[in-house]
Image (cartoon, rainbow, N blue to C red):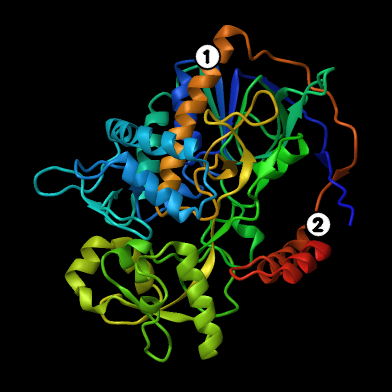
């Protein structure tokens, strides 16, 4: 079967042009960190975000951020757990960077104003999630870690809005990564900037171009490609697609993580679904099927705290055995005061649907949650296209392998955004990254009709869901 790849999106020609030393696309933990680190290191940085500055996947992260912050823990132990969760397919060198530099980056978050939960003695409160053999997950607001991290980073950015060295463009969809002339020796064409479609009020509107020698993609995941996902509506894989059209190498695209415990509200529910954090199971909640049988104890030594792929697959198999479409999360034995203090966000979300963790069995089922693959990068975030960087969920750094260890995602965005920003600054200063003129890429242009969205979601869900087969994947590929 031949696949015809579009080289650019069908879009109007840019009506305005801006210039920067680096463009950061995305305003989650990775994008905000990259922009803040770049602001004082290059003359001009431009941050572009698809919605409002406070949007994206980071604000929805409940459980926490993993790092060896306890004196009894170690980066080596964190490394072992990460490699085990990735079932032998992680890049050990990238994981070593993650776990070694992680504690310092988390402490820097605190210095930037992020307020984490603490013990009475002032030490960070740490909990455990699936796949971890130690308490190393720091959290904020009980179960509102991502929202607190986002708040702190946006506040840092707001404090320097008047700085002429940084500009923020909200409600801007990145259309394509612009590239220059390919090298004579077969090297890929270098980055020349991006084209945007800005929708909404502001000094810039409509389709425009930002010319820059460095582009940092921090566009998040692909959740809305599936019928049910915990991802926000913005997570449609824009960054991965733009990188692919620009000639970047992708990797591990097949490694899609499905969160085991997403609130089940019926088969017809669409859009972003409510996540019931793994931290609830970390505190001692159990999974039972609709017959009341606790089934995880016989599946894995860690039972409900097995790696996410193990739990998700076990749930789907149990659904087939019982003929049901959901299982039940039982946290009733943990007590009302403890649950409401530890999980106020989840408690509020459940209350909207008439459910209470303290008194009810909560219906849950797996849904798409995280994409471990993406734009292949090295350990400083460089993609295969010169001048193109990718950080956070859009990137394939190799730290996750086939299955991300719980709460490593925020840490990855933090660590590798910091590294990418410092690498860009060094290369801009040395002249290794220079502005080139954009050149129109040959080949077809395309734009998928919006009406095809539900069909794409059905194909992806049926063919590349929790349990897969060669025949199912082949059928999905042919249908797409």
Q: Compared with residue 164, is residue 8 higher up or lower down, i.e. above or below?
A: below
Direction from residue 1 to residue 175 in the image, left or right: left
Task: Please identify the quarter of the rendering in which residue 299 is found.
Answer: bottom left
Percent coordinates x, y for residue 50 in the rendering? 60, 43
The reply to whether discs 2 and 1 touch (Cβ–Cβ < 8 Å) is no
Residue at point 34%, 82% (across, down)? 361
Disc 1 target residue: 426
Residue at point 37%, 61% (across, down)? 130
* Disc ID at residue 449: 2
Observer-nearest of 448 and 254 = 254
Q: Say which of marks 2 and 1 sits in front.
A: 1
Secondary structure of the residue carrying tag 2 is loop
Observer-nearest of 234 and 476 = 476
The quarter of the image holding the C terminus is bottom right
Q: Compared with residue 219, is residue 355 higher up or lower down, i.e. above or below?
A: below
Percent coordinates x, y for residue 20 in the rendering? 61, 19
Task: Report how far apart the C-alphas of labels 2 and 1 lie in the structure.
Answer: 42 Å
């Amino acid at each position: 079967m031949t696949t015809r790849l579009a080289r650019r999106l069908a879009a109007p020609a840019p009506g305005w042009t801006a210039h920067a030393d680096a463009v950061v696309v995305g305003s989650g933990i990775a994008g905000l960190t990259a922009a803040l680190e770049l602001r004082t290191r290059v003359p001009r940085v431009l941050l572009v975000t698809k919605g409002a500055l406070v949007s994206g996947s980071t604000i929805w992260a409940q459980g926490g951020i993993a790092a060896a912050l306890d004196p009894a823990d170690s980066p080596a132990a964190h490394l072992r757990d990460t490699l085990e969760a990735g079932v032998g397919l992680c890049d050990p060198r990238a994981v070593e960077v993650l776990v070694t530099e992680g504690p310092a980056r988390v402490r820097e978050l605190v210095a930037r104003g992020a307020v984490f939960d603490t013990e009475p003695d002032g030490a960070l409160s740490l909990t455990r999630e699936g796949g971890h053999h130690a308490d190393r997950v720091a959290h904020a607001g009980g179960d509102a870690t991502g929202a607190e991290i986002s708040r702190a980073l946006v506040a840092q950015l707001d404090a320097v809005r008047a700085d002429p060295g940084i500009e923020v463009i909200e409600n801007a969809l990145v259309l394509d990564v612009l590239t220059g002339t390919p090298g004579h020796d077969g090297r890929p064409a270098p980055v020349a900037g991006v084209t945007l479609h800005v929708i909404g009020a502001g000094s810039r509107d409509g389709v425009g171009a930002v010319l820059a020698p460095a582009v940092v993609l921090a566009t998040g995941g692909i959740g809305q490609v599936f019928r049910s996902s915990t991802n926000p509506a913005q997570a449609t894989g824009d960054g991965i697609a733009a990188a692919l059209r620009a000639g970047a190498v992708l990797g591990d695209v097949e490694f899609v993580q499905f969160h085991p415990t997403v609130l089940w509200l019926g088969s017809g529910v669409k859009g972003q679904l409510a996540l019931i954090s793994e931290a609830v199971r970390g505190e001692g909640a159990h999974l039972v099927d609709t017959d009341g049988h606790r089934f995880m104890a016989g599946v894995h030594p860690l039972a409900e705290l097995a790696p996410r792929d193990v739990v998700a697959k076990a749930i789907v198999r149990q659904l087939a055995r019982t003929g049901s479409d959901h299982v039940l999360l039982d946290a009733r034995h943990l007590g009302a005061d403890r649950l409401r203090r530890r999980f106020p966000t989840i408690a509020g979300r459940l209350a909207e649907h008439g459910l209470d963790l303290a008194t009810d069995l909560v219906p849950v089922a797996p849904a798409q949650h995280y994409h471990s693959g993406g734009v292949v990068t090295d350990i400083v975030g460089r993609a295969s296209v010169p001048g193109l960087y990718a950080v956070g969920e859009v990137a394939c750094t190799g730290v996750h392998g086939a299955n991300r260890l719980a709460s490593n995602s925020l840490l990855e965005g933090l660590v590798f955004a910091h590294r990418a920003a410092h690498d860009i600054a060094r290369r801009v200063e040395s002249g290794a990254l220079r502005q080139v003129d954009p050149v129109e890429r040959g080949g077809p242009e395309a734009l998928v009709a919006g009406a095809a969205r539900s069909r794409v979601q059905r194909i992806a869900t049926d063919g590349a869901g929790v349990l897969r087969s060669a025949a199912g994947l082949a059928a999905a590929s042919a249908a797409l």
